[in-house]
Amino acid sequence: MSSLSSVRSDSFTRFVKEVETRLQRALVARYGLDLGQESAAEAMAYAWEHWDRIQTMANPAGYLYRVATSRSRRIRRPLPMLPQVGASSPVWVEPHLPKALKRLSGNQRTAVLLVHSFEYTHSEAADVMGIAAGTLRKHLSRGMSKLRSDLEVADES
Amino acid sequence: MNPELLERRLSEYGRHLDAQIVPLEGVDVRQLGVKPPARRGWLVAAAAAVFVLVLLGTTTWVSQLTSSDSPVGATGTSTPLASVDATAGDADGAVSVTGHLEGSQYWHGPIEGPGTLGDGRMEMSDERLSGDVTFIFNGNAWEPSGPYLYWGTMLIKNDGGTWEGTHLAADHHARPGVHGPIVMQLTGSGDYAGLSAILYRTVLSPPGTALTDLEESVDGMIFPGDLPPNRN
């Protein structure tokens, strides 16, 4: 027997499967590992609570990202704690990169990490951040410019 | 480092982050702390009411003056004029905004001199108001524990244009735990021509907090049209 609640639960489970990675990556990029994952979980809880409305949206992931950032601003968050390089890390990470990323604004850091670290297209990254592709490109361009300057990246020419 | 190497480093960092992100899949969101809607609604309403009362308590005073030199805390009440919901708008096109200011400077003591420069970055729920901000401070204070005033001009700049206007603070060193709200009134230009904004910046400063660790928030409204004339 299928009840209304189980139908709701099934559609929500499919939704979580579809958007969780994008949302987690975007919020981890913005707030760091711990707060980012916490914000993503809170956003999903918000989605469950407002599922009737959220499931009809054209871009629910972008909306939930905005919900998470809006809530985070009301509770003043410390600067993001991006993971540093540990000796046991399976991946080699440029030692100065986390510090340089931390100096970017939240939007710039999210745009840079979504596009250059998680390899999203501009359109995909803009979608999950709930902003226009043109705005994404501006954040990305300014963020990369700051990163190049901080890490003393030589010009290509 | 060359540009290609930076790209590779960023890609490696992405894998580093991915390896540490714990999937939500399989987690029952109903166990993530969501309260039943009815109870949560009451909590939200109660929290909003407390917030509005605290905010208005700092701005609308019914002072009880005494003959003592010691400051006396004053509170008051008023009818709320606007919601603080960051997504709210009204028929006149006014939009409520919330956010915070990062990297601003604080100091004890008088403003160093007319025209002292400060800067920071505004991160607001409405991107139109996010950007690099510059303040010029003028002010004076009775030190070390009296009232203080400061005022000046300010500019928020982002890719779409600028917001230019004034800021004003009037407070007393003895008021514990909070500084502000500092009133900011701004006029947009560039993409924001024809818009104005009124913002309130509040700095929480519990006793013993280092000046570098203060928490602060900004909220207010963007609206079409000009600020009223004769603002002096």
Image (cartoon, coloured by chain):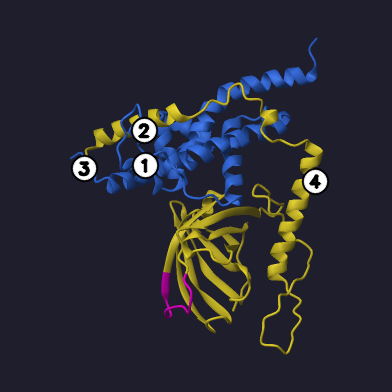
Chain colours: A blue, B yellow
Marks 2/4: CA–CA distance: 43 Å
Which residue was labeled with disc 2? B13
Mark 2 / mark 4, whichever is N-terminal: 2
Q: Residue at x 37, y 42 (%)?
A: A98
Q: Main secondary structure of the magenta part?
A: loop
On whether residue B115 falls in the magenta region, the answer is yes
**Residue at mark 1:** A98
The amino acid type of the residue labelled 3 equals Asp
Residues at marks 4 and 3, CA–CA distance in whole angstroms: 57 Å
The answer to whether mark 3 and mark 2 are in CB contact below 8 A is no
Pointer 4: what residue? B42
Q: Position of residue A24 (x, y in %)?
A: 52, 32
- Residue that sits furthest to the top in the current view: A1
Q: Please name whichever residue, B166 or B69, is drawn nearer the observer in this view of the structure.
A: B69
Q: Are marks 2 and 1 in contact (CB under 8 Å)?
A: yes
Q: Quadrant of the N terminus of chain A?
A: top right
Q: Chain of mark 3?
A: A
Camera-near label (3 vs 1) is 1
Mark 3 to mark 1: distance in Å? Answer: 21 Å
